[in-house]
Amino acid sequence: MLYLFATFVVLLLLVTGTRGLKLLFGLGINVISVIALLILIADGFNILVTTVLISVVILIVAIYMNVENGETANTAFQTSMLIMLFILLITIPLEYWASAQGLGAENQDELESFSLAAGISFPRLATAIIVINSLGVISETSVAITSGLNEIVLNKPTLTPKEIFDDGFSVGNKILNTQTNTLLFNFFSATFPLFFLIHSLGYKFTDIINDKLVVAEVLTTLICTIGVILTVPITTYLVYRKASRKLKKIN
């Protein structure tokens, strides 16, 4: 694994040059942030509050250290924060209703000799996992849409509000296709061994869709996809609002 990491670093520096050092630094901060989140949760800190605070740090690093245009970074950060809070609000009740948190029956053999009295709320822990899992794809989508739409507005300052919204949705729809496929492939890659095991054991379809691990992965994928979809109108509106303010100042 050390050789593989060294290859990653060398290739990154060859492709991005000195900017790769900045990317590595940001990646290191985010890795430390996630480790800090795990330690704080294990030490008894409030899971939801800690998750929100660490998520803000991750978003700041992921966006502001990788986007040179300050206006684009601000819009992407605002969008990501709104989507993160929305995901947090819908995930909390969904996790309780779905009862998909915790460990599945497939984990019994590995955990048989361990105590499961962790002393934490598994629904809240599942919520934290979904929020952290969504940060990368949401920030990436928001930055891509904001950058594209800002370029359009900059080159065509006379655009009407309707044209700005149309261009925003046009840019967003192209990015959504890629991001949705990415989330879908991540879901299948994460659950492929589980589906293989379930199929080999002759599970019924009803058993599959009610399996705790499957439901947890489906919830994560669907919630992240909803967040990505909402990124399009929210980002478009924020860019439109800033463009309208500039036009009012000029006029």
Image (cartoon, rainbow, N blue to C red):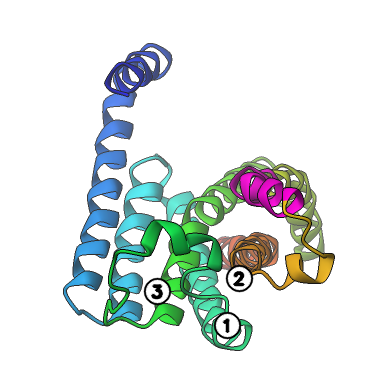
Q: Does the magenta stretch include residue 58?
A: no
Tell which residue pokes out farthest to the left in this image.
43
Quadrant where the N terminus is found in the figure: top left
Asked whether residue 249 appears in the rendered view, the answer is no
Quadrant where the C terminus is found in the figure: bottom right
In percent of width and height, residue 165 lies at 76, 61
Which residues make up the magenta segment?
A: 184-200
As helix, strand or loop, the secondary structure at mark 1 comes to loop
Mark 3 or mark 2, which is nearer the start of the sequence?
Answer: 3
* Residue corresponding to mark 1: 99
> Is 226 situated above or below 59?
below
* Residue corresponding to mark 3: 125
As helix, strand or loop, the secondary structure at mark 3 comes to helix
Q: Quadrant of residue 16?
A: top left
Circles 2, 3 touching at the beta carbon (< 8 Å):
no
Looking at the rendered structure, the kind of residue marked 2 is: Lys
Asked whether 154 or 29 is in front, the reply is 29
Q: In this view, does 73 lie to the left or right of 193?
A: left
Circles 3, 1 touching at the beta carbon (< 8 Å):
no
Looking at the rendered structure, the kind of residue marked 1 is: Ser
Looking at the rendered structure, the kind of residue marked 3 is: Leu
Asked whether residue 208 appears in the rendered view, the answer is yes
Pointer 3 local density, CA inside 10 Å: few below 14, some 14–19, many at least 20: some
Pointer 2 local density, CA inside 10 Å: few below 14, some 14–19, many at least 20: many
Marks 2 and 1, Cα distance to the nearest angstrom? 8 Å
Circles 2, 1 touching at the beta carbon (< 8 Å):
yes
As helix, strand or loop, the secondary structure at mark 2 comes to helix
* Residue corresponding to mark 2: 212
Name the residue rendered at 27%, 22% in the picture. 2
